[in-house]
Amino acid sequence: DKAEIGLIGLGTMGSNLALNIAEKGHRIAVYNRTPSRTDDFVAKAGALASRVVPCESLADLAAAIRPPRPIIIMVLAGTPVDEQIAALRGELAANDIIIDAGNANFRDTMRRFKELEGSGLTFIGMGVSGGEEGARHGPSIMVGGKEESWRRVESVLTAISAKFKGEPCAAWLGTDGAGHFVKTIHNGIEYADMQMIAEIYGILRDGLGMAPKEIGSVFADWNKGRLNSYLIEITAEVLKADDPQTGKPVVDIILDRAGQKGTGKWSVIEAQQLGIPATAIEAAVAARVLSSLKDERLAAERVYGGGVVPIKAPRETLLKQLELALFAGKIAAYAQGFAVMAGASKEFNWNLPMPTIAKIWRAGCIIRSQMLDTMVEAFGTGAASTNLLMAPDFVKMMQEAHPALRHVVALAMEAGSPVPALSSALAYFDSYRQGRGTSNLIQAQRDFFGAHGFERIGETGAFHGPWGQG
Ligand code: NDP
């Protein structure tokens, strides 16, 4: 009995995805570079092992799958993907589909798509979000490639995806790099969301002197309201957990140095390339970089003094404001992420379906939240087509929440509690809502030193100032 689908790479994501596929009734052939991992996988697959065909080589893998073969590659992003594709090419035949499900840079995906064009093979770049748990029980799946290739794998991918009120969180989003681009921006928004949560945690911990468990309860409460989301939920759980080794709260034994694998950075690079402001995401990426400079920060603390001035404010009122501030900051971060996607959609001719993107992010992925359901509506009716901040539902939410964001940022800045993402979100919002900004001065300066010219209000053409005329 031949398998319907193949999978290469039985690491954290690949092994769980393979079990998910088998569980949905599909026979799957698997291959891993290190054979012992394949053996371990089969040993742990339990009853599902009957639907798994372990293979010792790519030739075995190709032979085990019924043509035309769909093969998922779930290995370390970068060169390993190119190596796997190169090795697979010799084993595959016309109409087979190679699906890269790792966190590829969409520019690599576009290149690979092109390289395989004309070979008879088809390439799909597929973003998968949801971590280990998502891969096993239902991730959010963002697909890029030819629509006809998607049609051929649609039933498997929708079967294994997360469901939001019965609707699958898997969709075809556009050609070549569209899926991996959307996954990248998903992660960019995730960086901003996590950073803002961490900033609020900082205010509660250092400004209010609250203990981890107390802060955990605050987040748990917030998770019942407008901030309801996976990231708030796990934040509450994390803050309540104790380290078995020391009995201390886990967050207190973890070094304050954040890692990153590139998707946040790519979001920022692409936003800059497209000329779309994504300041909250930029601030979040920079915050991770700064966090990694632990020794320098310790030295600077000795020079300037560290610490945060205690914030004196009635606790209940302040908590309400912190909740609203986080909400407002989050809206701005999403507005930026969607704006970057809109820019890329034009640049790369993807015609990205924004309502669908909001839909498939409602379950399975890391940034899933109640707010995304409101976004589906806002993008679906076209109300958010200029910017999410202009959709009536979001205007209402922002009008209610932005004063709190302003207040919290001001308080935090006075106290010396760093809020780079929240303050960037606020600055973006404030700049966005100024009908009259200050770039008239920038234009004058540019003209002064570089004769760049400027526009006069209400007139067409380029003008110069009276500089150097005494
Ligand atoms: P793991 O580190 O758990 O597994 C890596 C896999 O890649 C292993 O199967 C490993 O094989 C294989 N591999 C590494 N280098 C090579 C190579 N040169 N040639 C062949 N195979 C190789 O990684 P994850 O499962 O976490 O991640 C896989 C992909 O999924 C990455 O692109 C990641 O960014 C992405 N991703 C991860 C998420 C997560 O939450 N972990 C979420 C979403 C996407 P071997 O056993 O031989 O070492």
Image: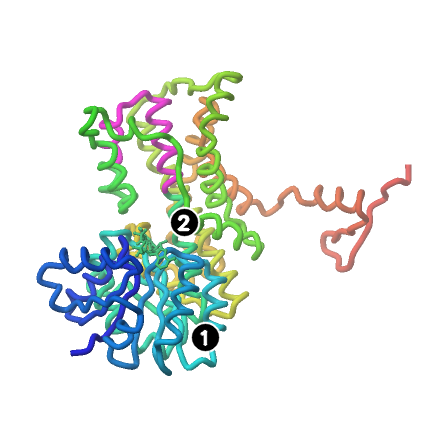
Residue 116 belongs to the span the image colors magenta: no
Q: Which mark is residue 414?
A: none
| Amino acid at pointer 1 | Leu
State the residue position of label 1: 116
Label 1 crowd bin: few (<14), some (14–19), many (20+), radius 10 Å: some
| Amino acid at pointer 2 | Ile
Quadrant (top left, top right, bottom left, bottom right) of the N terminus = bottom left
Whether residue 377 is visible, yes or no, is no
Q: How is the image coloured?
A: rainbow
Frontmost residue, 406 versus 413: 413
State the residue position of label 2: 189
First reached walking from the N terminus: tag 2 or tag 1: 1
View quadrant of ligand 1? bottom left
Ligand 1 is within 8 Å of the C-beta of the residue at disc 2: no
Helix, strand or loop for disc 2: helix
With respect to residue 36, does 167 lie above or below?
A: below
Q: Residue at x 45, y 75 (%)?
A: 116
Residue 329 image offset from top left, x and y in percent = 41, 42
Frontmost residue, 425 versus 366: 366
Main secondary structure type of the part rendered in magenta: helix
Whether residue 34 is visible, yes or no, is yes
Quadrant (top left, top right, bottom left, bottom right) of the C terminus = top right
**CA–CA distance in space, label 2 to label 1:** 31 Å
Boundaries of the magenta span: 194-219
Q: Residue at x 47, y 35 (%)?
A: 420
